[in-house]
Amino acid sequence: QVQLVESGGGLVQAGGSLRLSCAASGRTSSNYVMGWFRQAPGKDREFVAAIRWSGGMTYYSDSVKGRFTISRDIAKNTVYLQMNSLKPEDTAVYYCAARNSVVIVTTAADFGSWGQGTQVTVSS
């Protein structure tokens, strides 16, 4: 079972950028999909992006496509979410998650490991 710790959240003005990091530790394998989800107050947890650990295939929600980039550093066992052109509606707690599969899915229930979340607040 993998443990995940997010970092990099903060307060930024609309149009700005942030990069989130998710460090994985504990038992790991190459057969993982890593995902980013977000949850705003009063809203359901929402899929943002996912990456297949082996090979690096990515998939994005339409709401962030072209603005966000998910990537991973295999040597550091870390996944990143580069967020550009941030909008106030991007404000949420962002969670990274891991799924023990090579298949990318977008439902939170299919991800078995979760980080503690990091707050992203976009003003204006």
Image: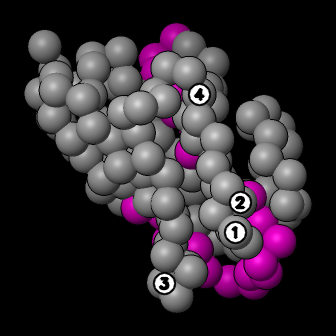
Q: CA distance from mark 4 to mark 2?
A: 15 Å
Label located before the other in sequence (4 or 3): 4
Tell me the quarter of the image containing the N terminus. bottom right
Q: Nearer the viewer, residue 58 or 107?
A: 58
* In the rendered image, the vertical position of residue 22 relative to residue 65, given as above or below: below
Which of labels 4 and 3 is toward the front?
A: 4
* In the rendered image, the vertical position of residue 24 relative to residue 7, given as above or below: below
Q: Amino acid at mark 2?
A: Arg
Q: Residue at coordinates 33% horizontally, 41% vertically from top-left?
A: 83
Q: Nearer the viewer, residue 62 or 113?
A: 62
Q: What residue does disc 1 label?
A: 55
Do residues under tags 2 and 1 come within 8 Å of each other at their CB atoms?
Answer: yes
Where is residue 88 drawn, in percent x and y? 27, 17
Q: What residue does disc 3 label?
A: 76
Label located before the other in sequence (3 or 1): 1
Q: Residue at coordinates 52% horizontally, 67% vertically from top-left?
A: 72
Bounds of the magenta span?
21-42
Q: CA distance from mark 2 to mark 1?
A: 6 Å
Do residues under tags 4 and 2 come within 8 Å of each other at their CB atoms?
Answer: no
Residue 66 shows in the view: yes
Q: Is residue 41 left or right of residue 28?
A: left
Q: Is residue 54 left or right of residue 94?
A: right
Q: Residue at coordinates 58% horizontally, 74% vertically from top-left?
A: 24
Where is residue 45 drawn, in percent x and y? 62, 26
Q: CA distance from mark 1 to mark 4?
A: 20 Å
- Secondary structure category for the residue under label 3: loop
Per the rendering, the mark at residue 61 is 4
Q: What residue does disc 2 label?
A: 52
- Secondary structure category for the residue under label 4: loop
Where is residue 59 drawn, in percent x and y? 64, 41
Task: Estimate how packed mark 4 is, as few (under 14), some (14 to 19) or many (20 or more) residues with alpha carbons within 10 Å.
Answer: some
